[in-house]
Image (spheres, rainbow, N blue to C red):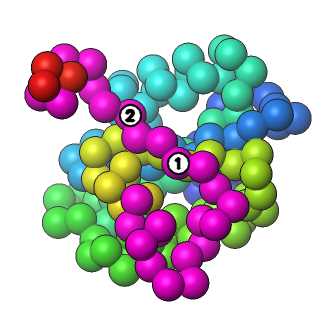
Amino acid sequence: MMEDGLLIDGPREAAHTIVLAHGAGAAMDSPFMDTVAEGLARNGIRVVRFEFPYMMARREGGKRGAPDREAVLIEAWRDVIARLGGGTRLVIGGKSLAGVSRAWLRTKPGRADSYVSATRFIRQGSRRDRA
């Protein structure tokens, strides 16, 4: 279900909400992101997906552009966290670029994620899995 630019799966009254962002090349509704979100939702976790500004522009205009700079990515995370109310029941994570950008939140003064647990999804079979 789309709600104000957010793609939401799972029960609204779930004990935890995980916010997922896409990687550099694929949107929030890519097959990989759909699979992860649907699997978590089937297990009673609410999943909220969003897109970074460059991906929204790509979706609207069809033009491929480079990912946003670090400051823009961090601001997008902070905006979504604030919109969802933060708190200890909110978990953030993402694929590739999104996993890295959420980690940047932890390194910045005045970070917005002092109340957020974080995770990163790594595609099975990737080089990291073989290492």
Q: Quick one: 76 or 118, which is closer to the camera?
A: 118
Q: Nearer the viewer, mark 2 or mark 1?
A: 1
Q: Seen from this angle, which residue lies furthest right?
A: 13
Mark number, residue 118: 1
Q: Seen from this angle, which residue lies furthest front?
A: 131
Displayed quadrant of residue 113: bottom right
Q: Amino acid at mark 2?
A: Phe
Q: Tag 1: Cα neighbours inside 10 Å, few (<14), some, or many (≥20)?
A: some
- Is residue 28 rendered magenta in the image? no
Q: Which residue is mark 2?
A: 121
* Secondary structure of the residue carrying numbered label 2: loop
* Secondary structure of the residue carrying numbered label 1: strand
Left or right side of 85 for 96 = left
Displayed quadrant of residue 121: top left
Q: Amino acid at mark 1?
A: Ala
Residue 108 visible in rendering: yes
Residue 60 visible in rendering: no
User: Which residues, given as a range, are shown in magenta?
Assistant: 103-128
Query: From mark 2 to mark 1, how far is it between C-alphas?
Result: 10 Å
Mark number, residue 26: none
Q: Residue at x 48, y 42 (%)?
A: 119
Q: Residue at x 66, y 15 (%)?
A: 42
Picture coordinates of residue 104 (x, y %)? 38, 67
- Is residue 127 rendered magenta in the image? yes
Locate the C terminus and report the quarter of the image it occupies: top left
Q: Tag 2: Cα neighbours inside 10 Å, few (<14), some, or many (≥20)?
A: few
Q: Quick one: 55 or 113, which is closer to the camera?
A: 113
Picture coordinates of residue 82 (x, y %)? 69, 69
Left or right side of 95 for 108 = right
